[in-house]
């Protein structure tokens, strides 16, 4: 499995307001860490059970993290780097993760160390047609009157295959490995 990380703190890079609501107020943050029953409201998790398993793991009491946002997609559009895999389909998901501990949320060092250690751990996984990228980004925690600048990580997990079903299977396997790795790192000092 290909695994890498990036630091995306530039002016034009994505940022996260946490907790979040979309401008139309149709979608919002679900606190799955303290209210796991809200998993039933996460449409992507209902359509992709492996994502639900990952969300349960990263929001569990054993995890140092909580999920903030997620999505899934399927495509036949591959970039040049992905074409070398010989696949015609990609199934992907992303999950935004925040540390549960507020001091860790504000520490760039903790995020960079987590991203580095997670990718090193995932590179040891069995060879499968999948790729994981961890991106460290800026996050604004709290309400407008009391916002604190910090960081979050986005995990992109993509599986590849000759059809959507095989790409989806590869993504699910990679997502399971990523969930186990997050729990393993949560149990050790970062």
Image (cartoon, rainbow, N blue to C red):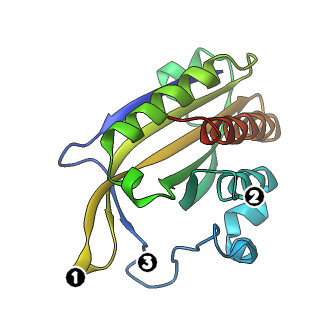
Distance between mark 2 and mark 3 Cα atoms: 21 Å
The residue nearer to you, when weighing 107 against 71, is: 107
Which percent across, then down, holds residue 140? 30, 64
52 left or right, relative to 187: right
The residue singled out by tag 2 in the image is 52
Left/right of residue 23 with respect to residue 73 in the rendered view = left
- Residue 145 numbered mark, or none: 1
What residue did someone put label 3 on? 21
Q: Residue at x 68, y 42 (%)?
A: 183
- Of the residues tagged 1 and 3, which is closer to the observer? 1
Quick check: 170 above or below 35? above
Q: Residues within 10 Å of mark 1 (few under 14, many from 20)?
A: few
Residue furthest front in the image: 189
Q: Which is nearer the N-term, disc 2 or disc 1?
A: 2
Q: CA distance from mark 1 to mark 3?
A: 16 Å
Q: Assign a secondary structure to mark 1.
A: helix
> Which image quarter: residue 144?
bottom left
């Amino acid at each position: 499995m290909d695994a890498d990380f990036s630091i995306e703190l530039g002016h034009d890079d994505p940022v996260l307001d946490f907790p979040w609501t979309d401008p139309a107020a149709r979608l919002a943050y679900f606190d799955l860490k303290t209210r796991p029953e809200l998993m039933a409201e996460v449409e992507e998790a209902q359509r992709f059970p492996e994502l639900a398993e990952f969300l349960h793991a990263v929001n569990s009491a054993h995890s140092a993290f909580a999920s903030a946002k997620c999505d899934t997609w399927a495509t036949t559009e591959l970039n040049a780097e992905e074409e070398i895999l010989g696949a015609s389909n990609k199934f992907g998901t992303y999950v935004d993760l925040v540390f549960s501990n507020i001091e860790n949320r504000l520490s760039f060092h903790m995020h960079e160390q987590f991203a580095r250690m997670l990718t090193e751990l995932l590179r040891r996984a069995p060879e499968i047609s999948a790729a994981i990228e961890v991106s460290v980004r800026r996050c604004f925690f709290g309400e407008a009157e009391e916002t604190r600048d910090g960081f979050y990580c986005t995990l992109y997990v993509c599986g590849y295959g000759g059809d959507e079903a095989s790409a989806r299977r590869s993504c699910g396997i990679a997502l399971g490995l990523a969930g186990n790795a997050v729990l393993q790192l949560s149990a050790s000092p970062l």
